[in-house]
Every structure is written in structure tokens, then in C-alpha cells.
Image (cartoon, helix red, strand yellow):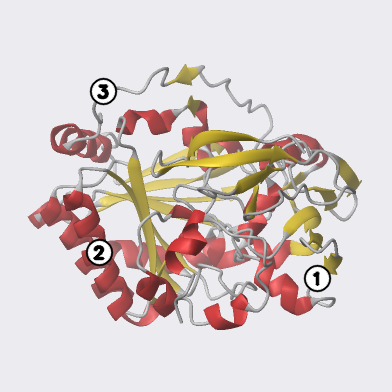
Amino acid sequence: MNSAATKAMSWGRYPRVTQNVVRMTDRHAPLPLPAEGSVLPYGLGRSYGDSCLNGGGTLIETRALRRFISFDRQTGEIACEAGVSLADIIEVALPHGWFLPVTPGTKFVTLGGAIANDVHGKNHHRAGSIGRHVRSFELLRSDGSRLLCSPWENADQFAATIGGLGLTGLVTQATLQLKPTASAFLGGQSIKFGGLDEFFVLSAESAASHEYVVSWIDCLGRGETFGRGHFLRANVLDAEEARGLKAGRPLPLAVPITPPISLINGLSLKAFNAAYYNRQRAHIVEKVWSLDAFHYPLDAIANWNRIYGPKGFLQYQAVVPTRDQRDVSEALLAEISRSGQGSFLVVLKVFGDHLSPGLLSFPMPGTTLALDFPIKGEATFALLDRLDAIVMEAGGRIYPAKDARMSPACFMRGYPQLETFRKFVDPRMSSSFARRVMENVR
């Protein structure tokens, strides 16, 4: 087994760790285990925090596991190795009228990574998280055992692995149920709203009529501008509506270098948010999007994470329960606005009541807020601690895939099934995240 120590960081560029990396190139082979130390499955590394890092240990890189095993064009059931990316699946399935049942904001994640983080998307109110659409997978454990896991076979291990952050073993292959799509385009509206009350009215109205809903919100708004934003809602166009439409080729944009300081600061953020909100003069604008433009706008900019400078950034995503979602959302946004910290990438969305199958899955009925914070030293960490306190008091939770700093107490309180999950952790699997929030904490 060839391995080499390498310095690595997550997509948020924080923290930075040193770890060994080995490649797995054959799903039928045993795990490439070092003589000692922990291992962690690793796909494309698009988690924002340290759940995809294993400082001092070994990563098992799975990107070479890129083979498709089967694809039923009639039913939309597709089986492939865990290193296949969502982009790969779209390329194969879309020409035949099938699309991902659930997709996060980037298609550059592996299927194994999507399962490990039980990703969600803009259609959670209709479809829930991706774990609800996984038919089965093979789990390779460090003792050499291979478990076929599904809701009906090894169901406990299935529930632990969905959203299990790669800690229960390595998923070698998986079968996913795709959703039919009449075209590669969506039609809908972009609606300006002036505050949180209007946002929640739009969310309630749109849940029944539109498959995809999401909103951008101005995180620095105060007074009359507090809680303002743009609400997007869309449905897939049918074949006749999409006739003649062509997806334009995006410009080959990239951030070629890391600037010496973060380009996201109070002045640039305030100016951007004002311009972005006012870019649309009419209250409602009819829109047509390609699938890429709607679901993956940031994928068009290579290495966009570099704009936050050498210190990197912390992405923060929380969900709070339905009962107090309006007041708690206001409290979170007010705290962020007072701090003057934040980013232009701010997403506010109402989750549906489809329960996730995973023991550590993040989504729950309620409202989720996600945004980036350039790291400005202790002030940034202190702000996020204050946000954690608001979320915990409301009975909410923080998304592990986007976390690099929450406390063990915060994690335990947000994930009450943690003790059950521990029973299914592979004894050789660990991560920087797991050691930070789970080890020796009862």
C-alpha cells in the first residue's frame, strides 16, 4: 500500500491538517488499511469543515471507483460505484429523461459523499433528503465484511450510514432511484420580498405549487431593509414549453489565485447586497433557467472558495423547528446583522416534513439558514457560538458537513440519536470532526 503524508484542507480552506492519502481503485479489493491509525473514506472533498479530513490519520480516496454498474432507462434505477459524481450521473441519465431526485448546490460531489452527508436540496418539501431515494448500498468494513444495506436488509446499518459522515465503513457501490424529468429547463418566478413575514407567506403558498423553492436574503439588512430578499420558485418545463431552448455555455470563469486578504468585507458585502436586491426592479419576474443555472450557479466559477483569502471561511448552516421558526430566524439574522459579518451567499428555506432516514441526518421540519463567514479571528468564532446558543435554545441543530467548530455539547444536543449511532461506527474509521465532537464525550 502506497501512501504519502500531505497537507490538506476542506472546501472552506479551514482547518489545515496533515494526513496520509491512499487510493482505492477496485471495489472488490479489501480496504487499504495502514498498520495503525484511523482511516476515512474521501470523495471530492467538498465538505466545508473537517468532516472530510482526518488529521494525523489516513484518507481512503475513492474517486477511482467511477464505474456504472446498471441503469434501467424504464424505471430510472441506477447503480454505480461510490466514487461516481453527481455530475457523472446527470451526464448519463439526463439524455434519457431522468434527473437526480435530490441535489445539493454543487454537482461536484460523489454519490458516496452525498450518502454520507445525506444531502438535501431546493425540493426538500417534496422529496426530503437523498437518503430517502437510496435503494441499497454495499458497505465494506475494516474487518473485511461486506454488508448489503437497504431499508429491508441490515436496516440499522443503513440508517447509521445515511448521514453517517463516513464513519460506519466505506460505501463501495449504491443504487439510487432517479426522478423523471420532462426537460432540462425550469420555469418560475423571482419575487422580491421585504421581510420575514412575506418570506414565510411565499414559502407556504409555493410549497404546493412549485417543486423547487429557495431564497436569498440580505444578512446585513437593518430597519426597513431587515429580512429583505429574493424568493425563487420553479417547476420543470414540459417538453413543449422547453422546445427550442438551449442552455448557454457558461463563461470559463475561475479565481486563479488566493488573494492576500478576503475580498468579502463589510464594505464590499453591503454594496453587493444592495445591488443584488435592487437588480430586479419589478416585484415578480418570470424566469427560465437551465438545470445548471438554477441548481449549480457557483459551479460555473472554478475555485470560488479562494475569494475568502488565506484564512478561509466558515460556512454555517442551522435548522430550527417549525414551531418558532419565524422568531428564531429573526433572532439569528439580527445577531448576524449586528456583527457586520457574513457573506453574499445567504440561503433561507423552509424544510418539509419528510423525515430523513439517517440517525445523524441534518434536515428536520422547520427553517434552515446557510451562509459563509470569512474568518476574522476570535470575533467570527464568538459570533457563531452566539448563533449556536440561539439554535440550541430553539431545539435546532447544525449541519456537520458544513461545520468546523461547533462544540461537543452542541452536537450532542442537536443529534439525540448519537448514542445509538455509536454502536455502528467502524472501529478503524475516524475523522477530525468525529474526534472533535464525539470522542470521550458521553
Of labels 1 and 2, earlier in sequence is 1
Element type where label 1 sits in the image: loop
Of labels 3 and 2, earlier in sequence is 3
Q: Residues within 10 Å of mark 3 (few under 14, many from 20)?
A: few
Distance from Cα at disc 3 to Cα at disc 2: 27 Å
**Residue named by callout 2:** 385
Q: In which quadrant of the rendered view does residue 190 lie? A: top left
Distance from Cα at disc 3 to Cα at disc 1: 48 Å
Q: In which quarter of the image is the N terminus?
A: top right
**Residue named by callout 1:** 150
Q: In this view, does 135 lie to the left or right of 305?
A: right
3 vs 1, front mark: 3
What residue is rendered at 38% in x and 29% in y? 306
Distance from Cα at disc 1 to Cα at disc 2: 37 Å
28 is higher (above) or lower (below) than 430: above
**Residue named by callout 3:** 260
Label of residue 120 in the image: none
Q: In which quadrant of the rendered view does residue 338 lie? A: bottom left
1 vs 2, front mark: 2
Of labels 3 and 1, earlier in sequence is 1
What residue is rendered at 58% in x and 20% in y? 249
